[in-house]
């Protein structure tokens, strides 16, 4: 086991595509690091460079303190799980798992013992003599994992290993992946475009966009203190509500609303226009919120009852934040109706009496506001991290 | 090969509910089956006639009323054929030429195909175009230039000369076909092997090679049949009775006198067809397996 260090790592493909740009990242020994970002942002390329499958244009890669930048993949002592699993179709499950040991000339008896041990761990004992073609998707996924585990490598590299599973299976396998990591404690770099997966699995998560790492932090920190608009929009479901706002003295004005700012959490005095971000849980039905929190009132357009929560949607008389990349980022953000106005999502107590078409008074907590520079997208809070709200904020996945 | 002309699969369960449509479908199927049988007959008849003639006594062969097959079969023609001068020499030559051509082409074609399918290099496109383009040149036009070139290097009337010549048309075809097979193998398979501990060459041999086995078999059958049956080049490049190939040997049955020994000719032809059939039976089992199934999802 070992830490992985990436220094000024850059990849330019033939033809000039800049896929990874000056990435600096340190994955601690035994850490589960998730790289997350929209498709095409360079996650796979970065992972493949660590594996040695892609030549490094510039920078250095160290695994366990050893510079492996120019070493062949087999000399790096890392194991990789591919999105497609890449099982050897002409070999049985036993041969697939044992391949890495065999080419490293491990004694036969030891190979057999280790393969069977791993097969036991993953519940593959019954399947050892099958061919990949005779396995289900979930079983193939486990064989791919087994092939990585059996070698007891310095690090696991996983490229979207769950994306070929159906949604239900994915949740189960995700949980067992976390268990497996807790048990084996092997340094892991895990790539996914699914922020839920990233948030649930990662001890730390690196958010990537256009070949760069924007922010590396623990999931909670990413959620609570996104350094820029992209991270804010990308992390969290339902996504953060974003709107252009004007700072008028001690008030924030957006659309038809005017809300007093929390003096402990406000943008710098000189900021006039900002992008204001509010997570759905910064709202509450007025009936269930403490009286000191400011109120707004709006007409409910859509209402979704989820049992534990109710989500209400209402219009804000302000343009949508039209960053195409942001819309593209959250793939489930598929709005059928092209709306000029921003549609806000507020999570409220399930006891709410709200109805579609009726007006609802909402409490809106300015202590949970996020402010971003409309030009650069950078957070206007990052400079002085305000005290965070207490653990009442629960990750909604 | 045409023996397995099965066009429509047998129905598993009778279709109920739509008798009109199912009757029409059955009719279509019968029609296609008839077409299939017809094609089979056309293809198989000459082979049948060759074999049956080989066993007929001379008077039956020359009789004006043809018979399907003889009630008193004879092996005499086979004896004649085998005892004609150079039969064993020439069969041996053919086996050597074909064996070396097939083995060498497969090894070279595999490596060339790997290079074309798995690497990018300048001139790659041009190389592929040339490979196909060259195959379109008429063979007859190549005979004299090839002869001149081979003579300069003392390769006329040698088996190596013929092997070289055969490889000029077996190799491009094989490389082309194998490249197609290799393109169908996901890149991740070799990458997985390389991360697992193989060298690049190791990954080619341990992962790619077994997976293109069906392609190798298909191309080697082609290579075997083409070079075994080749006549023109062998006829021109080899002019020593003991150094010729089986096809050239066979050609001496005809056209040399007013009387053609049909029985011997058919017996000889039958014998010479045997190696091709044996080779095919040995390797065809491999073609059937779709080995890449299950490598990646679905
Ligand atoms: N072999 C390649 N040659 C050229 N460009 C590539 C190659 N592989 C990936 N790219 C480009 O690099 C960028 C990053 O790709 P990738 O790392 O696969 O993204 P991700 O895994 O985040 O979806 C993309 O723009 C992609 O088109
Ligand atoms: Mg990818």
Image: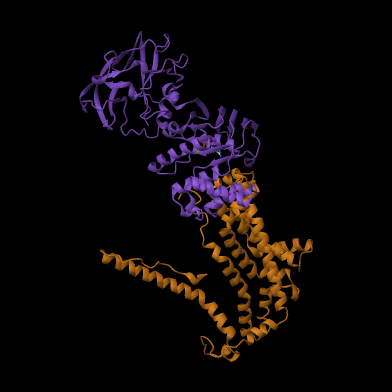
Q: Is residue B248 left or right of residue A210?
A: right
Residue at 50%, 70% in the rendered image: B2
Q: Nearer the viewer, residue B78 or A110?
A: A110
Identify the chain drawn in orange. Answer: B
Colouring used for the render = by chain
Residue B135 vertical placement versus B57 (above, below):
above
Q: Is residue B37 left or right of residue A88?
A: left
Residue at 46%, 69% in the rendered image: B5
Residue A309 vertical placement versus B289 (above, below):
above
* Residue A318 position by quadrant: top left
**Colour seen for chain A:** purple
Residue B176 vertical placement versus A171 (above, below):
below
Q: Nearer the viewer, residue B154 or A196?
A: A196
Residue A7: x, y in percent? 60, 27
In the rendered view of the protein, which quadrant contains the N terminus of chain A? Answer: top right
In the rendered view of the protein, which quadrant contains the C terminus of chain A? Answer: top left
Residue A235: x, y in percent? 42, 28
Residue B236 vertical placement versus A228 (above, below):
below
- Report the label total: 0
* Residue A3 position by quadrant: top right
Q: Is residue B246 left or right of residue A256?
A: right
Residue at 25%, 30% in the rendered image: A303
Q: Do we see residue B115 in this rendering?
A: no
Q: Is residue B115 left or right of residue A387?
A: right
Residue B130: x, y in percent? 63, 52
Q: Do we see residue A152 in this rendering?
A: yes
Residue A43: x, y in percent? 51, 34
């Amino acid at each position: 086991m070992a830490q992985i260090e990436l220094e000024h790592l850059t990849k330019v493909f033939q033809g000039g595509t800049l896929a990874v740009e000056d990435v600096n990242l340190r994955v601690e020994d035994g850490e589960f690091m998730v790289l997350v970002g929209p498709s095409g942002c360079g996650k796979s390329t970065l992972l493949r460079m660590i594996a040695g499958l892609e030549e490094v244009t510039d920078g250095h890669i160290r695994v366990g303190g050893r510079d492996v930048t120019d070493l062949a993949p087999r000399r790096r002592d890392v194991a990789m799980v591919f999105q497609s699993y890449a099982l050897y179709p002409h070999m049985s499950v036993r041969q697939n798992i044992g391949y890495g040991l065999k080419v490293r000339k491990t004694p036969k008896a030891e190979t057999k013992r280790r393969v069977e041990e791993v097969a036991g761990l993953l519940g593959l004992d019954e399947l050892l003599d099958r061919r990949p073609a005779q396995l289900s998707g979930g079983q193939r996924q486990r064989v791919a994992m087994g092939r990585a585990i059996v070698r007891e490598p310095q690090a696991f590299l996983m490229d979207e290993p769950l994306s070929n599973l159906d949604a239900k299976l994915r949740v189960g396998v995700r949980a067992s992946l976390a268990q497996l990591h807790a048990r084996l404690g092997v340094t892991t770099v895990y790539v996914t475009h699914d922020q839920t997966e990233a948030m649930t699995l990662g001890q730390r998560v690196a958010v990537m966009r256009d070949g760069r790492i924007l922010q590396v932090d623990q999931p909670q920190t990413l959620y609570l203190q996104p350094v820029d608009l992209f991270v804010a929009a990308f992390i969290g479901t339902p996504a953060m509500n974003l709107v252009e706002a004007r700072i008028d003295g001690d008030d924030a004005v957006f659309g038809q609303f005017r809300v007093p700012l929390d003096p402990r959490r406000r943008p710098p005095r000189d900021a006039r226009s900002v992008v204001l971000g509010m997570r759905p849980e910064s709202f509450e039905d007025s009936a269930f919120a403490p009286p000191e929190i400011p109120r707004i009132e709006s007409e409910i357009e859509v209402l979704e009852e989820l049992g534990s929560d109710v989500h209400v949607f209402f219009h804000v008389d302000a343009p949508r934040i039209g960053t195409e990349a942001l819309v593209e980022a959250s793939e489930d953000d598929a709005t059928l109706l092209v709306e000029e106005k921003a549609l806000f999502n507020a999570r409220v107590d399930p006891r709410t009496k709200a109805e579609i078409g009726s007006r609802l008074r909402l409490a809106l907590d300015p202590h949970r506001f996020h402010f971003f520079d409309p030009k650069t997208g950078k957070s206007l809070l990052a400079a002085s991290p305000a005290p965070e709200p207490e653990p009442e904020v629960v990750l909604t996945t | 090969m045409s023996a397995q002309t099965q066009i429509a699969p047998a129905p598993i369960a009778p279709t109920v509910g739509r008798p009109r449509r199912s009757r029409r479908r059955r009719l279509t199927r019968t029609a296609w089956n008839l077409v299939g049988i017809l094609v089979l007959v056309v293809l198989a008849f000459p082979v049948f006639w060759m074999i049956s003639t080989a066993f007929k006594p001379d008077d039956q062969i020359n009789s004006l009323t043809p018979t399907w097959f003889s009630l008193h079969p004879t092996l005499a023609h086979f004896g004649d054929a085998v005892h004609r001068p150079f039969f064993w020499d020439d069969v041996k030559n053919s086996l050597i030429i074909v064996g070396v051509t097939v083995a060498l082409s497969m090894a070279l074609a595999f490596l060339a195909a790997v290079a074309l399918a798995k690497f990018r290099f300048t001139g790659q496109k041009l190389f592929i175009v040339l490979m196909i383009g060259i195959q379109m040149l008429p063979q007859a036009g190549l005979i004299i230039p090839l002869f001149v070139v081979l003579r300069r290097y003392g390769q006329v009337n040698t088996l190596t000369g013929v092997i070289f010549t055969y490889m000029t048309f077996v190799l491009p075809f094989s490389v082309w076909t194998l490249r197609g097979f290799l393109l169908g193998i996901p890149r991740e398979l070799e990458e997985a092997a390389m991360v697992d501990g193989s060298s690049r060459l190791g990954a080619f041999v341990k992962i790619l090679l077994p997976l293109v086995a069906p392609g190798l078999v298909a191309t080697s059958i082609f290579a075997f049949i083409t070079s075994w049956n080749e006549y023109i080049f062998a006829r021109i490049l080899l002019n020593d009775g003991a150094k010729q190939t089986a096809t050239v040997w066979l050609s001496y049955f005809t056209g040399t006198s007013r009387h053609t020994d049909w029985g011997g000719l058919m017996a000889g032809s039958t014998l010479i067809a045997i190696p091709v059939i044996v080779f095919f039976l040995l390797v065809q089992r491999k073609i059937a397996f779709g080995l890449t199934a299950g490598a990646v999802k679905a």
